[in-house]
Amino acid sequence: GGNNFLVNTMRIYFTADNQAEDRLQKRFSQIVSILNDAGVLIMSNLAEKNVTGFSSQDLEKIEQTGEVLLEKMDGLVIEGSKSLAESGYLIAIALTHKKPILYLSEKGKQINKNLQHLKKDKNTAKYLNLEYYTDNSLHKIILEFLQKVEKGEGREVPNIKFTLRITSRIERYLHWKTHNTKTTKADFLREWIERLIDDDEGYQKFIGRRGQK
């Protein structure tokens, strides 16, 4: 039951070396199915090879690639055991758009020094997760990353403060709604407002015209 934490479909871009040996190809399929089971919509550079777990619908959606795509994604997952020429480029775009990144490497393989160096920057470190995995830990590492994405460490961080006076009736409702959950009252209200924004067609048209996000 731990997999139903994704309310709106989360979109993850998964990339790996499609020339890699069979042993790694099997691993890629494993990663795709872990993401699939968690209810994630996956886009990937491996789609042409039809990594198991892609439906024909997914394949249609994957036709657009690169920059445009990453902007629309909630996170980036890279299997980098066999290093990938374009991973630096993808990481740069993901960081520009403040998208969380999970860079996976088999235990025992050295992760690129430039990436290790990026981790030293505290703004980058928020988004860039470098993880060494074994077959046993892969599932846990991916699900923990998805929970991070879900919590929105890479999504906009609320930083504007204002005071909202509420009635005791609203207070009771908020208490009831968040009681026995990990969500705070403020988080609950923020998520609720975010949903209102997404569902407000008039506003979406308005910001669409202005070309804003």
Image (cartoon, grey):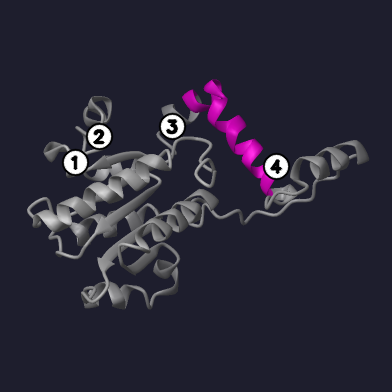
Q: Secondary structure at mark 3?
A: helix
Q: Residue at x 59, y 38 (%)?
A: 194
Q: Amino acid at mark 4?
A: Leu
In the image: residue 206, left or right of residue 193: left
Residue at far front of view: 136
Of badges 4 and 2, the one in the foreground is: 2
Q: Main secondary structure of the magenta part?
A: helix
Q: Which residue does the numbered mark 3 point to in the structure image? A: 210
Secondary structure state at the residue bearing disc 1 = loop
**Nearer-the-camera pick, 171 or 143:** 143
Report if residue 194 lies within the magenta region: yes
- State if disc 2 and disc 1 touch (CB < 8 Å): yes
Residue at mark 1 to residue at mark 2: CA–CA distance: 6 Å
**CA gap, disc 2 and disc 3:** 35 Å
Residue occupying the point 41% across, 62% down? 127
Give neighbour class at mark 2: few <14, some 14-19, many 20+ (Cα, 10 Å): many
Q: Is residue 131 left or right of residue 26?
A: right
Mark 1 highlights which residue? 51
> First in sequence: mark 4 or mark 2?
2
Cα–Cα span, label 4 and label 1: 39 Å
Q: Quadrant of residue 115?
A: bottom left
Q: Are marks 4 and 1 in contact (CB under 8 Å)?
A: no
